[in-house]
Image (cartoon, helix red, strand yellow):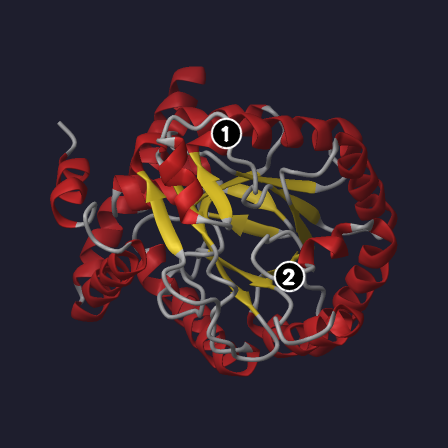
Amino acid sequence: MRVYPTFFKLAFSWMDAEKAHKIGFQGIRAAHRSGAGRILARLTAPDASLRTEALGLTFPSPFGLAAGFDKEGHGMEALAELGFGHVEVGTITGQAQPGNDKPRLFRLVEDRAVVNRMGFNNDGAAAVAPRLKSARAALQRKHPDVRPVIGVNIGKTKAVQLEDATEDYLVSARSLAPAADYLVVNVSSPNTPGLRLLQNVETLRPLLRAVGDAADEAAGRHIPLLVKIAPDLSNEDIDDVARLALDLKLDGIIATNTTISREGLVSDATKVESLGAGGLSGAPLKQRSLEVLRRLKDAVGDQLVLIAVGGVETASDVQERLEAGATLVQGYTAFLYEGPFWASSINKGLAKSRKKAR
């Protein structure tokens, strides 16, 4: 019997989703501060068989936490203690901003999904950079052999006009790259007006080239650079992004972000409509995200690292994506429904599968 789903139903399901997230995250961080996280880490540490080489780095596990959970870099060490092979922080913008008006985060429990229109609420790149540096150094001390990896996801400040977007991304790149293991350019959130227009390859090309150059220069080393795309792109646009990534010699692509689609949901249609705009994440994305992954794999082969995200709930889901061409896999929404031992459970399932395959 799984205990957490019952706990979630009693303690969190009736609560405002953003408030519940805040309380849950505070609990995870409190466990770390009390020292309980170090004990927990011994139980959740990924099996050595799961170590994965990607982006010039060694990941303790191919399974990590997607951007969106730790938006401001407050809990990287605490989250690593739960068994995630990497934690992607963000989305972080060049300037601090409060995000969209509340309420802005909603659950669709029947669909094991979430709708959000958070709007990149964060403290800004300058404030987050020292947190990244501190956490990365602490993880290195605790894991001198193979430590959890820290990725950083950057986006456009809402107040910045599209024509000035590149310079805004460069502010983040220069501040955050020195403390990042890899950097992700997010041009696919539906919650910043006009942002998805940057996925057009003519606009994306100079943006990615400028961010890559600035990141490497600021860090004094090569910072692996990836772009995160939406599941709502047409197949032709996916192919265009793949060709662009190869042409620019990017390190990888993350597929996919949230969707603006509401197709195939079992939740009451009136309820879904009442929630308003926002990106949908969770189980309903499973099929489309997998389709995008397979199309990208056909286009880029082994030349780029593909990170799969969208609808990932179980070790079987992770394994399916690895077999479909992903090198790394991320999850987020199921974390809210499955609780703090979710990553450890997935790692154990993956390790068990690999032992069986030997």
Of residues 34 and 257, the one nearer the viewer is 257
Q: Give the image location of residue 134, x and y in percent.
A: 43, 76
- What residue is drawn where x is 58% and y is 29%? 288
Of residues 33 and 145, the one nearer the viewer is 33
First in residue order: circle 1 vs circle 2: 2
Marks 1/2: CA distance? 25 Å
The quadrant in which residue 257 appears is top right
**Amino acid type, label 2:** Pro
Q: Give the image location of residue 48, x and y in percent.
A: 40, 40
- Please identify, in this view, whether the residue under mark 1 or under mark 2 is nearer the observer: 2
Residue bearing mark 2: 193
Residue bearing mark 1: 286
Q: Is residue 22 left or right of residue 319?
A: left
- What residue is drawn where x is 44% and y is 70%? 72
- What residue is drawn where x is 53% and y is 78%? 124
Q: Is residue 220 in view?
A: no
Q: Is residue 27 left or right of residue 326?
A: left
User: Does dot 2 land on a helix, a strand or a loop?
Assistant: loop
**Amino acid type, label 1:** Lys
